[in-house]
């Protein structure tokens, strides 16, 4: 497809891209989201995700070797306009929009799943998503208004995992029903004397839950968990970052 040159911020496309970067509601309304970077572009093409358009810098080495699938609109912009459009502090020279995919909930069966309860940092959600993919998880459950799965920072932090590993936004009742029908026990990563120690306690048959960065797992979710497990650490250390805790849990889950 022939490239198109856009030079003005007043072009409707620019307003569209800016809104995709900033508004979760607009992403839902349009069924589209924004991704940034040549590495992500390569992953998108590799996994055959439905890309709608790609934006590169005109007369630049950025995107010069891009393979653009048939039917994908290719837009070129000046470097200063790319800086305006990109949601990142350091634009990577390639922006593209993807048709938002809604994953169907999995059929009830035992597998390797992780649930995130109210995580607010898009970078954390994306990093955990990437780690879950790397360590063999079958998907993520997102509870209590986690950071938007399609926020540009979430997408970028997944490094392409969002194109191949499902993540489902669910209610607590949906999660409880899935776990019960799959024969799995919800297991809270928590602290306290009533917690079993990870490494001694086997996560086989469990669906671990990681809590909010600042407040941990919510009371309603904690009450729904049949087990509580603590990651052993030095007494002088209070807790782990949510992404680090998720990594440990996923690693142990993979060994079960």
Image (tube, rainbow, N blue to C red):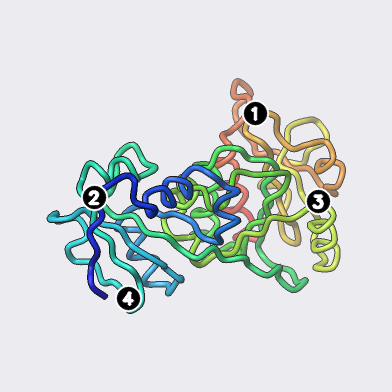
What residue is shown with label 3? 172
Q: Are marks 4 and 2 in contact (CB under 8 Å)?
A: no
- Residue 158 pos. (x, y %): 46, 53
Q: Are marks 1 and 2 in contact (CB under 8 Å)?
A: no
- State which mark lies toward you, 2 or 3: 2
- Residue 100 pos. (x, y %): 54, 63
- Residue 112 pos. (x, y %): 65, 63
- State which mark lies toward you, 1 or 4: 4
Quadrant position of residue 181 = bottom right
What residue is shown with label 4? 69
- Residue 11 pos. (x, y %): 34, 51
Among the two numbered marks 1 and 3 on one chain, the one whose residue lies closer to the N terminus: 3
Q: Are marks 1 and 3 in contact (CB under 8 Å)?
A: no
Measured in 3D between alpha carbons, the distance from the residue under mark 2 to the one under mark 3, in whole angstroms, is 47 Å
User: Does residue 114 lie above or below 229 as drawn?
Assistant: below
Measured in 3D between alpha carbons, the distance from the residue under mark 1 to the one under mark 3, in whole angstroms, is 20 Å
Which of 211 and 197 lies nearest the eye of the viewer? Answer: 211
What residue is shown with label 1? 214
- State which mark lies toward you, 4 or 2: 2
Relative horizontal placement of residue 8, taking residue 201 as reference (left or right)? left
Label 4 Cα crowd, 10 Å radius (few <14 / some 14-19 / many 20+): some
What residue is shown with label 2? 7
Residue furthest to the top in view is 236
Residue at the spot x=27%, y=47% of the render? 8
Quadrant position of residue 48 = bottom left
Measured in 3D between alpha carbons, the distance from the residue under mark 3 to the one under mark 4, in whole angstroms, is 40 Å
Among the two numbered marks 1 and 2 on one chain, the one whose residue lies closer to the N terminus: 2
Among the two numbered marks 3 and 4 on one chain, the one whose residue lies closer to the N terminus: 4
């Amino acid at each position: 497809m022939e490239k198109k040159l856009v030079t003005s911020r007043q072009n409707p496309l620019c307003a569209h891209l800016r809104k995709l970067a900033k508004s979760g509601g607009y992403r839902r309304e349009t069924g589209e989201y924004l991704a940034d970077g040549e590495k992500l572009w390569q992953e998108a093409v590799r996994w055959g995700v439905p890309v709608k358009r790609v934006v590169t810098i005109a007369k630049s080495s950025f995107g010069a070797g891009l393979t653009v699938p048939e039917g994908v609109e290719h837009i070129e912009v000046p470097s200063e306009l790319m800086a305006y459009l990109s949601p990142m502090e350091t634009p990577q020279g390639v922006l593209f929009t993807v048709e938002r995919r809604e994953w169907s909930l999995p059929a009830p069966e035992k597998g390797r799943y992780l649930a995130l309860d109210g995580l607010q940092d898009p970078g954390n959600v994306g990093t955990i998503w990437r780690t879950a993919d790397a360590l063999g998880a079958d998907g993520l459950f997102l509870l209590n208004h986690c950071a938007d799965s399609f926020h540009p920072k979430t997408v970028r932090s997944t490094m392409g995992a969002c194109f191949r590993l499902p993540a489902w936004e669910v209610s607590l009742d949906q999660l409880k029903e899935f776990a019960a029908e799959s024969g799995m026990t919800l297991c809270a990563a928590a602290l306290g004397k009533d917690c079993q120690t990870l490494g001694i306690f086997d996560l086989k048959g469990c669906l671990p839950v990681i809590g909010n960065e600042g407040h941990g797992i919510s009371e309603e979710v904690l009450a729904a968990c049949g087990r509580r497990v603590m990651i052993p650490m030095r007494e002088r250390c209070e807790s782990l970052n949510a992404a680090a805790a998720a990594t440990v849990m996923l690693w142990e889950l993979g060994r079960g």
